């Protein structure tokens, strides 16, 4: 099992190196963005085909787990960001702290949260519902939280709902509709679902890191400052992972729900964060402000990939 863990992490590392050396440009950006959309939609279709209707209904009605995940995303994260800023104001410069506080206000990722929950053998139905709800609510709550933190007048960007519906909910519903006919096939071919989960993560990593590199990730800030941002991001993630694990235990959630809380409650969405930042902040500041988010995005993928594989291997979620 250790060999398989290493092979997956090796693929992630190779993807980052490839994006650093050969990031996608021009038409390539459109190609990989389209590929990411297709793979994510396929992942949701297969998840919908695999999950029973009963599991989906239980996932939708599990208000306790949804409340726990949303509280982690929109309450615990902002409070932790402000606490870190108050405790270590000189750790980062002003623009980087703005970026850290901004990422704390963002909704959870969708595709990687669900993929890691699936890899760890958690409650996928609940993860789909919670992560999607997080993104929909984030369209309104993120500008509100940023406004509270920075005193900015913000809009709600309601146009962002349609991509979530078209790319995530529609394929999942289509899979549910097809479930009576292809559900058994999906169960028999679990490796195909696993390939879809991991393949979507690799494509997202390459696309996201390519964007970071083309925006000057390695040149816009001194290496020391980038290192400090990485330390703050990693520390934030470790603390959040610990608190989500603790919340799952204290709330006496079953194993599958605890896993979903960990992987949905600890993530922050790069896909939502970049466009939201472009609306909330001046164009000249956006590049630097989203750097902590870009770094956090990579850190969370690497750390959670390892954690998901270990949870899945152990089969107990502890």
Image: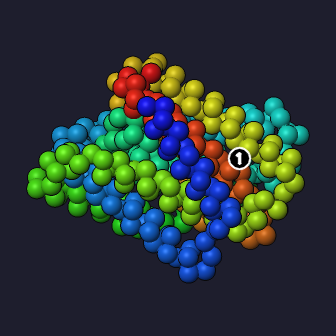
- Identify the secondary structure beneath mark 1: helix
Left or right placement of residue 292 versus residue 131 in this view: right
Left or right placement of residue 283 versus residue 239 in this view: right
Which corner quadrant holds the C terminus?
Answer: top left
For image coordinates 39% across by 62% down, the residue present is 39
Q: Residue at x 87, y 54 (%)?
A: 222
Q: Could one spot residue 68 in this view of the protein?
A: no
Query: In x, y percent, where is residue 75?
Result: 58, 38
Q: Residue at x 41, y 46 (%)?
A: 115
Please state the horizontal and vertical placement of residue 46, each as a whole percent of the image: 27, 54
Residue 9 image offset from top left, x and y in percent: 54, 43
Classed neighbour count for the residue bearing mark 1: other residues with Cα under 10 Å, few (<14), some (14–19), many (≥20): many
Residue 119 picture quarter: top left
State the residue in front, 5 or 212.
5
Q: Which residue is mark 1?
A: 101
Does residue 33 sit above or below 45 in this rendering? below
Nearest the viewer among 142 and 34 is 34
Between residue 32 and residue 277, name the one nearer to us. Answer: 32
Q: How is the image coloured?
A: rainbow
Q: Please tell me which residue is depicted at 65% across the width and 68% down the height of the picture.
A: 22
| 175 up-or-down from 189: above or below | below
Q: Quadrant of the N terminus?
A: top left
Residue 189 appears in view: yes
């Amino acid at each position: 099992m250790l060999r398989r863990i290493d092979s997956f992490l090796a693929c992630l590392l190779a993807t980052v190196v490839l994006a650093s050396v050969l990031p996608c440009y021009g038409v390539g950006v459109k190609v990989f963005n389209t590929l990411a959309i297709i793979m994510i939609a396929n992942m949701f279709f297969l998840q919908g085909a695999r999950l029973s209707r009963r599991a989906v209904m239980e996932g939708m009605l599990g208000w306790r787990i949804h409340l726990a995940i949303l509280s982690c995303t929109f309450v615990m994260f902002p409070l932790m960001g402000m606490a870190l800023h108050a405790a270590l104001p000189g750790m980062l410069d002003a623009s980087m702290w703005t970026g850290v506080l901004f990422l704390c206000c963002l909704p959870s990722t969708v595709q990687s949260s669900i993929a890691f929950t699936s890899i760890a053998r958690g409650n996928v139905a609940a993860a789909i519902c919670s992560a999607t709800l997080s993104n929909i609510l984030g369209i309104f709550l993120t500008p509100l939280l940023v406004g509270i933190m920075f005193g900015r007048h913000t809009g709600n960007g309601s146009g962002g709902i349609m991509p979530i519906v078209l790319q995530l909910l529609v394929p999942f519903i289509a899979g549910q509709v097809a479930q009576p006919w292809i559900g058994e096939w999906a169960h028999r071919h679990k490796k195909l679902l696993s390939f879809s989960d991991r393949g979507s993560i690799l494509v997202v990593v390459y696309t996201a890191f390519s964007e970071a590199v083309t925006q000057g990730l390695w040149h816009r800030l001194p290496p020391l400052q980038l290192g400090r941002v990485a330390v703050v991001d990693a520390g934030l993630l470790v603390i959040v992972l610990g608190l989500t694990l603790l919340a799952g235990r204290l709330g006496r959630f079953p194993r599958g729900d605890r896993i979903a809380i960990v992987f949905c409650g600890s993530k922050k969405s790069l896909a939502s964060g970049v466009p939201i930042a472009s609306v909330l902040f001046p164009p000249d500041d956006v590049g630097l402000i989203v750097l902590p988010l870009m770094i956090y995005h990579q850190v969370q993928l690497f750390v959670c990939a390892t954690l998901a594989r270990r949870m899945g291997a152990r089969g107990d979620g502890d």
